[in-house]
Amino acid sequence: MPEQNSISIPILPEKATPLPVLTGMTLEEMTAFMAGLDEPGYRARQLYAWIYARRADRFETMTSFGKELRARLHQSARLRSLQLLDTQTSEDGTIKFLWRTHDGYNIESVLIPSEARDDQDEPKRRTICISTQVGCPLDCKFCATASMRLKRSLSAGEIVEQFVGVEREAGERITNIVFMGMGEPMLNYDQVFRAVSIFTDPDNELAAARHITVSTSGLPEGIRRMADEGQRIKLAVSLHALTNGMRSELMPINRRYDIAQVMEAVEYYYRRTRQPVTYEYILFDGWNDTDADVRRLARITRRVPSKVNVIPFHEIEFTNPTGISARLRSTPREKFDLFIRKLRDAGVTVMVRSSSGEDIDAACGQLAIKHGATALHDPAGSIAAP
Ligand code: SF4
């Protein structure tokens, strides 16, 4: 009699489990990892210090471990996962780093040297602009990254690795962090703030909370969550336009969360944290640089203690040259300076971001796109904005 319900189960080759990556692990996770190797808690604390505080990039340099433990670590884990593909150095000292992720995507980080306005007594400021996603789903019309759409979000480890990797390559300490590279950080909240907890662990000497800024296109949920969690890092909100019609044209996310909703979240944030807010404002010639814009910006910035970061627009070759993208131009220098003067006369605290790295592909996403952002992958379609 034939056997009833017999199912033939194919025997598949065992899939190799990728080794865990240590950078990005918290102390608790590293403790669990070391426990798996039958190593006590103090060894985990040593490993944690080697990776973050001492920036070790090879197990061989971890001299407080014997040869045998170093060999076992080597077999059981990887220290990092990003591979450096390319760098570009600007005449002004800005350096752009292109990384390849373990699954074949390209992401960027930018190291920006201290700006001229720093106090002479202050240590030199070195700011890293970190990516939080591969691509971005938000489709801002001035942004090269937008044309990649979203491939995936980065892990906390890949976020922290950008910092330690850039320090290693540049051979100098980074003092400030801005989450303003590829991607919308609030769409990757958990991993970004997990990375923040590693950056701000005083034992790691990576960066103080007051030197870290998360920059968002204005997602109210993330802004409120930062406030509710008492996050001490700084908040920057990209405005770029001050009427809903204009902002929706430039940043489609405004159709989902309009200026009023963004500002309600900003006010909530200020009420809970008492921390001032920075607004980012890219200046586009003849579009958002009129006297009416000065008045609107002055009005909006009075709502909570704040300052405005005015950013010159880099004309880039990767924006989709249709619709508004085709019309965006940078404001000429004289007109730019006049806009700043009028804003200051209106009582607004203004910072002017210099055009860092104008001679390299400094706009976020440009270098990754040039090198083929999806070297191994070409997943179809973007993920809809939230
Ligand atoms: S500007 Fe920022 S939020 Fe907008 S598409 Fe580019 S990466 Fe995304």
Image (cartoon, rainbow, N blue to C red):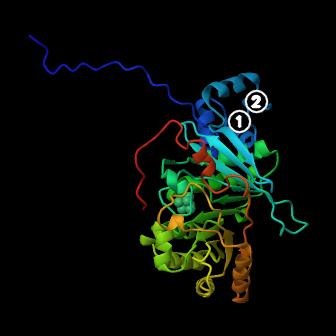
SS for callout 1 = helix
Q: Position of residue 15 (x, y in %)?
A: 45, 25
Identify which residue, 186 or 136, lies in the foreground.
136
Q: Position of residue 186 (x, y in %)?
A: 53, 61
Identify which residue, 343 or 323, lies in the foreground.
323
Q: Mark 2 vs mark 1: which is more N-terminal?
A: 1
- Residue for point 69% across, 23% down: 71
For residue 52, say whether it is visible.
Answer: no
Q: Is residue 362 left or right of residue 259?
A: right
Is 75 situated above or below 158? above
SS for callout 2 = loop
Q: Is label 2's Cβ within 8 Å of ligand 1?
A: no
Is 238 situated above or below 11? below
Residue furthest toward the left? 1
Residue 65's disc is 2
The kind of residue on which mark 1 rests is Arg
The mark closer to the camera, 2 or 1, is 2
Residue highlighted by disc 1: 43
The kind of residue on which mark 2 rests is Phe
